Image (cartoon, rainbow, N blue to C red):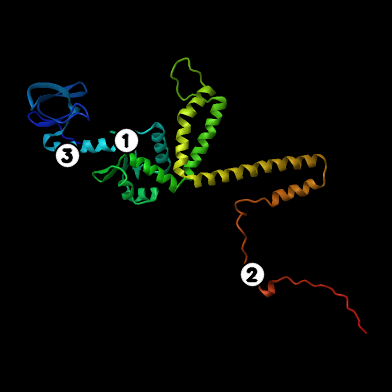
Amino acid sequence: MSVATPVAGELWVYRKNDNAPSECVEVLSVTQHGRKQRAEVRFVDDPPRVEVVPLGRLRTPWANVQAYDEYIANWEKLAALELHDAEAAAIAEVFEALVPESVADIYDGRYDYVVSVHDETAFAAIVGCPINEVATQCFSCRDGDTLLLGREGALISAELACRRNPQPILDVVFAEEAEAREGCKHGRKRTYKLHADDGDMTSPYWEWYWYLKSTRPRLELLRQWCGFRAVTADERRRAAEDEARRLDLLLVDAIEELERLNSPSAAWIKREHDEKRITPERVRPQIDRPLRPDEMPVREIKVRSRRWW
């Protein structure tokens, strides 16, 4: 919190760690030990107690103790929620895909998955609601101009962002499930080795274990955040595209078989297949203006005259 350097004779806040209470110490001297600095301090509440401590344990001048204690307490409240591994991984996936780092980030030197909002207007547009509605559902505070949302806020924000823009997340889910399917069939190339005798490929059994333990819970949580309608609409679209491709390949095989049999229908079916293919450019109804009378085609019909007399 403080960037000042302790000087002999000053009173500073000493904390053995972030969870320890603040203690008042008098700085006796500051010495350099290689690349590290250490300070000799006397504890004001226990004068006989003198210790040599790392300089990092002296947090701020004693005059700032109240503000410092409040600052540390706020961070403890922000990170109070213990996230499941699947929740943490899903939050990271959503923020990486949908939230630019210039708008908000979830990684901090102190605690991860606490949301630091840098651009509140842009963040509200991403989650689809005013930022105050998110802030009131979790512990929140400010660190200068930055709004901080607790880990509950990270979960809420990730779900709202998925509901607002589900397709990029569903694309990620589909791609990762396709990779997991191949891994559970054949294994995959190792990205790292825990032991020297590990092979270059993982086994399908290990991939199946990892899918059940980590991948599937995370992907199911992402689906839940995207919502039932978005998930079913995406599945229907993918099913329609895959079925159209299957039928296209089946028709190509049928045309080749007709050509092998020298069937006269082969050329006609092939031409109809190519020329009348429904593409994204043609799927919209074609709307033309009405024709003027002089533009309408004239059809002449010859009629045999009859004599009635």
* Sequence order check, earlier mark of 2 and 3: 3
Point 28% across, 38% down: residue: 78
Q: Secondary structure at mark 3?
A: helix
* Residue positioned most to the bottom: 309
- Left-right relation of 137 to 182: left
**Residue corresponding to mark 3:** 67
Count of picture labels? 3
Considering only vertical position in the picture, is 55 above or below 229?
above
Q: Quadrant of the N terminus?
A: top left
Q: Is residue 204 left or right of residue 160?
A: right
> Measured from the top left, where is residue 281 in percent x and y?
60, 53
Q: Of the residues shown, which amino acid type is indicated by label 1?
A: Leu
Neighbourhood count class around disc 3 (C-alpha, 10 Å): few under 14, some 14–19, many 20 upward:
few
Compared with 289, 115 (above or below) is: above
Numbered badge on residue 290 = 2
| Residue 258 at least partly seen | yes
Residue 273 in the figure: left or right of residue 203: right
Q: Quadrant of residue 258?
A: top right
Q: Nearer the viewer, residue 191 or 219?
A: 219
One can see residue 100 in this view: no
Tell whether label 2 touches label 1 (CB within 8 Å).
no
In this rendered view, identify the residue nearer to me: 82 or 39. Answer: 82
Q: Nearer the viewer, residue 156 or 17?
A: 156
Q: Which residue was labeled with disc 1?
A: 81
Tell whether label 3 touches label 1 (CB within 8 Å).
Answer: no
- The image shows residue 203 at horizontal and vertical percentages of 53, 22
Q: Amino acid at mark 3?
A: Ala
Give the residue type that dot 2 points to: Pro
Closer to us: mark 1 or mark 2? 1
Residue at mark 1 to residue at mark 2: CA–CA distance:
66 Å
The residue most toward the right is 309
